[in-house]
Image: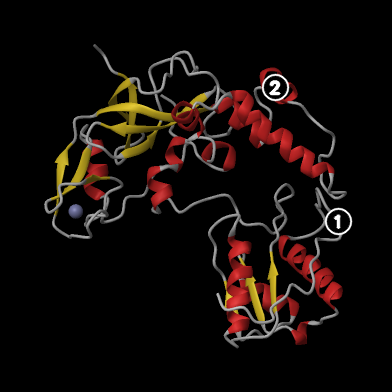
Amino acid sequence: MAEYNRPLPLPTPETQHFWAGCREGELRLQRCTSCKESYFPPRPFCPACSSREVEVYRASGKATLYSYIINHRPRPDFGDKPHSIAVVELAEGPRMMTNIVDCPQTPEALVLDMPLEVTFEKANDEISLPKFRPAKG
Amino acid sequence: MKQKTVAVVGAAETTEMGKIPNTSQLMLHADAALNAMRDAGLAAKDIDGIATAGDSPVEVAHYLGITPTWVDGTSVGGCSFMLHVRHAAAAINEGLCNTVLITHAESGRSRVGARRFSRDPASQQGQFEVPYGITNPPTMFTIPALRYMKQYGVTEEDIANVAVVQREWAAMNPRASFRDPITVDDVLNSRRTSRRSPSTFSARARAARRR
Ligand SMILES: [Zn+2]
């Protein structure tokens, strides 16, 4: 596999658990123990009620396709093949940006609200990116 | 907001428009500022407030020879400069300063002395958006379009019409880059024949293809 030359995240103390989870093949979300809100991106407090009483848990990895584009502009890092840039809605509620993979990058194959599941793309020993593919079965 | 006697006393653009490869971004600020100051009959010594976004208002003030008592660097995207006008009016009303210069400059195509399009990989965008390929308006602003179309029953033709109407307005501006009228069909066809068209709208239309 070619060397990964795309931009990569640099985890901060508040996001370490998330990226560690991705490295280990699990999607970790956070949930407020006061108001029960699940949220993303990671932070050590609840954006819905401002409580600091929050917990990390393993999310189902299930999502639906909320919206997306297919970028056709060639880029040195992403190459010249059309690729999706998507926002998915996780089963637990929060939305996150990602790419839809393992399917043609066409409007016919990418239908809004289609069921998806998480898959992890290893970039290096530190970073694996959570991506989503059409749900199997 | 209290209303006293605050007025826009001068306004101008850069001397050249379009692609300006022989001028740095900072000088674009200064060029537009000097033109506006001339329009108002003012010099640097007459100005005691400064505002800009993206670039540093301190840098622009130093460059122009302005010693401000009031500074605003509010930076919230393309509407920053509208907020600056509002903030400036409030500041003048409150007696914090008398005359404010608001500048915007972008060496958008030539990139002379312009900031690089990069984000700290530890920032929120750097961690949770940039790795998936977003860089600039064609890859960022377009993402919600498909959801919007589905939710509100908006068609490709509806969205193409935005570009048509924008072009009608541009035709009335002698300094606009594109002034020839276009139709909804032009917009939709341009997308289909030129899937790599660099224009933001074609990216948006492409994003908004049938679901
Ligand atoms: Zn809460």
Mark 2 and ligand 1: say if the CB distance to the nearest ligand atom is below 8 Å: no
Q: Which residue is mark 1?
A: B16
Q: Identify the disc placed on residue A97.
A: none
Residue A93 on image: x %, y %: 26, 37
Q: How many numbered marks are there?
A: 2
Q: Residue at x 74, y 72 (%)?
A: B8
The chain that hosts pointer 1 is B
Q: Residue at x 49, y 52 (%)?
A: B119
Q: Check the image and name the residue furthest to the front.
A: B3
Query: Mark 2: which secondary structure?
Result: loop
Q: Residues within 10 Å of mark 1 (few under 14, many from 20)?
A: few
Residue type pointed to by label 2: Ser
Q: Which residue is mark 2?
A: B194
Q: CA distance from mark 2 to mark 1?
A: 29 Å
Relative to B176, say whether A107 is above or below: above
Give the mark, 2 or 1, whose residue is nearer the N terminus: 1
